[in-house]
Image (spheres, grey):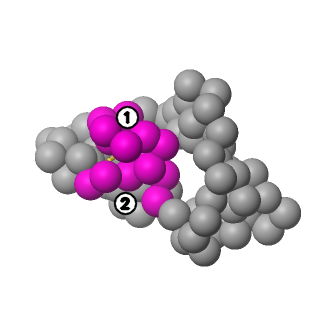
Amino acid sequence: MSAIPQALGADVRTQACPGGPLLVRGAEQVVALDGSVHDVLRPVVALCRCACSSRAPWCDGAHKMLPPARRPGAEDVR
Ligand code: FES
């Protein structure tokens, strides 16, 4: 799965969690896959990369219920 929300800001830094979300630091806004724009009110947020979150664009931990081969980034470690 390659589609993830987009983080906007002057000094955005990202870190992909293996098998989980994309951690984003310094974002001011996030644009979800449906085009909705969300203000970021925390210094660090976790964006869903698995498309299974019920709180998209935020990670809600649903990726933990996926089989390891279907978790985000699984295709990167084969
Ligand atoms: S990455 Fe955590 S719910 Fe999708």
In the image, residue 17 above or below residue 36: below
Residue sitting at x 53%, y 39% = 4
Residues drawn in magenta: 46-61
Q: Residues within 10 Å of mark 2 (few under 14, many from 20)?
A: few
- Circle 2 or circle 1, nearest the eye: 1
Badge 1, how many Cα within 10 Å: few under 14, some, many 20+? many
Amino acid carrying mark 2 in the image? Pro
* Residue sitting at x 31%, y 52%: 60
Kindly report the secondary structure that dominates the magenta region of the rendered protein.
loop
Which residue is found at the position 26% from the left and 48% from the top?
63
Q: Which mark is residue 18?
A: 2
Extreme residue in the right direction = 10
Whether disc 1's CB lies below 8 Å from ligand 1 is answered yes
Q: Position of residue 47 (x, y in %)?
A: 48, 52
Disc 1: which residue: 51
Specify the quadrant of the image occupied by residue 52: top left
- In depth, the one of 9 and 50 nearer the eye is 9
What element does badge 1 sit on?
A: loop
